[in-house]
Amino acid sequence: MLGRSLDTDLLLRHYAVAGPILERAFGKIPFVWSTLPAGFDGPTIFHGPLSVHTKPKGPIVDVPTASGLHRYPALSSERIEGLVRHGAVELYSWSPEPSDPTRVRFARILIEALPNADFRTLEAGLSAVEDVLSDGKIESLRVYDGGTGAALWIPFCDGPSYEEVRPWLHAQCAQAATRHPDLVTLQPNSHGGPPIHLHVQTNAVARFSVLPYSVRAAPDYPLAFAIAKENATNQHNGRPLNGRVCAANFAEWMERLGDPFVTQPARFYEQRFAEFRHESVAWPEPMPAQKSHGPIVNAAITVLQDGLSHSADEILTIAMKRGLLDAKTTVKYVYTSLIEYIARANGNGRKPAVVQNADRSFRINEPPDEWPAVSEEQPKECGPEIAALIERLHRTASGADANAFEEAVCDAFDKLGFAATHSGGQKAPDGYADALLGPLGYRVMIECKSGDEGTNDPSVFEAAKYKDAFGAQFSALVGRAFSGEIELVKELHNHGVSAWTVDDLETLLRIGANAFEMRPLFAPGFAADALDDVLWERHHGRAKRVRLIADAIVRTGRITQAGYSGASSEAPRITEDVAMVLVDQDLAANGSSATCTRADVRAAIEYLANPLVALVERDPTDGSVVVLATS
């Protein structure tokens, strides 16, 4: 089915059954829908809120948000059918009270497993969170997402605010992470770590997740579906539940098991948040290094910055000598941490910073650097102006003043070689930045997302909304952090948006980056992945090669000239070809298997002959070089 047009008849038959069920459980709430205009091979487009110029074709819900009042369709079976006829596939919402879209009806904890993880890993993650909720006498219901994850839906009848519920949910997840540190983590974009990630960010107005019984945008039309825990255990039969329920067999499935939103006991819907909100919920203490994969992988990345390949044993030895890891860390733990990190990054559509070689050693995920090491200057401390800007970025990114964060981001781009303009307001971009590169210049649209939680919102299309109107080449989404990578990375590529964290901007400010080397960072996806390439090029790229070649030409050239005692007219000439031979011999003598290129040798000679350097002089008769003596 991949690549073919959508089967609208099948979708209509499914939603003819699912629509009334959805309306019974979630009628009148605001919702979002997705379309696949180019089929399964094309992008998924999310729709909602409605345009102010669109005449509503049914009941609507006006939703107050931080960016103003937005109008959404109100969920009903009739409205769903009409949208499916016009291409709708998936249905999403933040599941509020029907009478108040800013109040919680169903809170949700999203449980994400690595794409290549065994289904039992997801089941273990669900049970870990369910055990915490059960200990607090909190009722919940499983909703499998039709892919590799699931969610626990928690009803409240007293309509608490999302600002109250979200940190409470986070605390429940923290309890699960404390009890099961090798299974569960809350850290977004973690380097390695446990195979189950918990997310609560979609518990906010206009931040949505998939609704139960929605079709998913994938071949065979798998469904998100609700099921009681005991039924899930009985239905497994050694196979995952995700993917088992699809549009074609949904009616049969419901006839056999029924709708658990209907069959739940009365206490399920009588649950009051007020009874739980004041409970003392312990937050986990920071895990010691030997219990956390993050520090281990970060230490390995630091060690591997030398450009060489190292075994897990060597990484551990070097890391302990540098004080990056303690003596309690084992070689096995280093090895498994790196393997799990690589699997997680690949599964999330990210570029892992570390890769494994055929001999089971590890190296940085860049072209191998076979050139000798060079002594590098210690990085300079950034000045007070840059330090103040970095502090302002972090402070405003987590605050409630969106305008202050937008201004800080624009000021950061100014310092990086752009002319940034802050716009803000409704019907306008947050800002845009012009790279000051003359004929190589380019424009970037800037969309900022401030707040305490990481960005996990598929509505990244907002970042690209004004690109054509402003004649921009790129679109950037800037936030404190990003989570829910499996969903987000697809949307970034679909809409041609790059995701930037405040940490990315801090790194660029600290190294004094410029707009020319930053251009690759605006490719769709996560800027952090391309930033690794920029940092690697600075330390192990052409500049290092040309530096080593220039040094070899000067050293070996002086030895060659000093060793000749005949007439000067017969002296051997150091041409580009001779320089290449001298450099390759020098590299071999230093134990390197690298070889130089003509282009790099030519660049080294041009550098040495520059009047500001003046370490060689060109012979005007044939272009060969003479190495000048120094005092």
Image (cartoon, grey):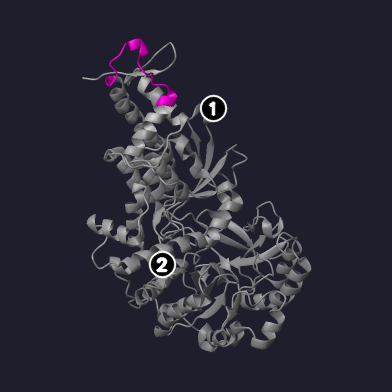
**Separation of residues labelled 2 and 1 (CA atoms):** 45 Å
Identify the image quadrant of the C terminus.
top left
Sequence order check: which comes first, mark 2 or mark 1?
2
Question: Residue type at mark 2?
Answer: Leu
- Within 10 Å of the Cα at label 2, are there few (<14), some (14-19), or many (20+) other Cα atoms? some
Q: Position of residue 534 (x, y in %)?
A: 43, 42
Question: Residue type at mark 1?
Answer: Pro
Q: Residue at x 32, y 21 (%)?
A: 613
Q: Is residue 410 visible?
A: yes
Q: Which residues are magenta?
A: 562-578
Q: Residue at x 42, y 29 (%)?
A: 580
Image quadrant of residue 218?
Answer: bottom right
Q: Position of residue 446 (x, y in %)?
A: 51, 44
- Within 10 Å of the Cα at label 1, are there few (<14), some (14-19), or many (20+) other Cα atoms? few
Left or right for 497, reference 221: left
Q: Position of residue 239 (x, y in %)?
A: 58, 80
Left or right for 117, reference 386: right
Q: Position of residue 26 (x, y in %)?
A: 61, 74
Q: Which residue is mark 1?
A: 439
**Of all residues shown, which one is farthest toward the left?**
631
Image quadrant of residue 23?
Answer: bottom right
* SS at circle 1: helix
Q: Which residue is mark 2?
A: 186
**Vertical position of residue 585 compared to residue 562: above or below:** below
Left or right for 121, reference 239: left
